Image: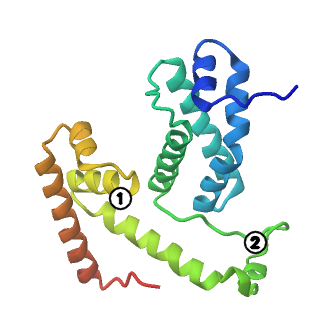
Amino acid sequence: MQKQKLDDSVLVRNYINGNERSLEILVGRHKQRVYSFIYSKVLDRDVAEDIFQDSFIKVINTLKLGNYNEEGKFLPWVMRIAHNLVIDHFRKGNRMPAFRNTDEFDIFSVLSDPSLNAEKNMIKDQIHFDVRRIIDELPEDQKEVLIMRIYRDMSFKEISDVTGVSINTALGRMRYALINLRKIIDKNKIILTN
């Protein structure tokens, strides 16, 4: 007898109704995709594991509190949580992952491997670091809107709802954030190309 594959929405509902096994199935089904996404951003297995676990702790808490807004989009919701936790990780440390030479990992083996194109990746990482540093110089209200729009991919309507300001005010803050970013980039002669 073939086992029927349950939809994510059915598994979520079953879990909310007390079926712990449903959550195991959901985690098993999406673990690889969510973990790979996190790892691709942080490039550190331990950090990726921590963020992965934190993502699912947040998922469990949200489901148990009954705050999950169904719409049958479980995976995109989990990916958004993971994405936000990755941003929080970098914001807390305000840094890119550090590379250390250890017995298991030798930075020179990466640098000598042309298939990884390490130089290009290091330049890209430096650009991301510089952008985060520049964003931190913005006034708080502009920084908030920019992060919501660019990093969290929120619409101006969603930003308006979250911040409690009108859509026009949110748009204005974004505009000023971009103008100020340009001024900071020019003032510090930062080059953001690779």
The percent coordinates of residue 148 (x first, y second) are 33, 50
Marks 2/1: CA–CA distance: 34 Å
Residue at 64% across, 57% down: 39
Q: Amino acid at mark 1?
A: Ile
Mark found first going from the N terminus, 2 or 1: 2
Q: Residue at x 63, y 19 (%)?
A: 15
In the drawing, does residue 165 fall left or right of residue 138? left
Position of residue 162 measured from the top left corner of the image (x, y, whole percent): 26, 38
CA neighbours of label 2 inside 10 A, class few (<14), some (14 to 19), many (20+): few
Q: In this picture, is 15 found above or below 9?
A: above
Q: Is residue 80 above or below residue 187?
A: above
Mark 2 = which residue?
A: 101
Q: Residue at x 64, y 38 (%)?
A: 53
Quick one: which residue is furthest to the top in this view? 17
Measured as percent of width and height from the top left, residue 18 is found at 64, 12
Q: Nearer the viewer, mark 2 or mark 1?
A: 1
User: Which labelled disc corresponds to residue 82?
Assistant: none
Q: Quadrant of residue 187?
A: bottom left
Tell me the quarter of the picture where residue 120 sits: bottom right
Estimate the x, y position of residue 156 in percent, counting from the top left: 24, 49
At label 2, which amino acid type do we have?
Asn
Residue for point 66% across, 55% down: 36
**Which residue lies under the disc numbered 1?**
150
SS under mark 1 = helix
Secondary structure under tag 2 reads loop
Q: Nearer the viewer, residue 2 or 153?
A: 2
Left or right position of 22 against 102 = left
Asked if 140 appears above or below 25 in the picture, the reply is: below
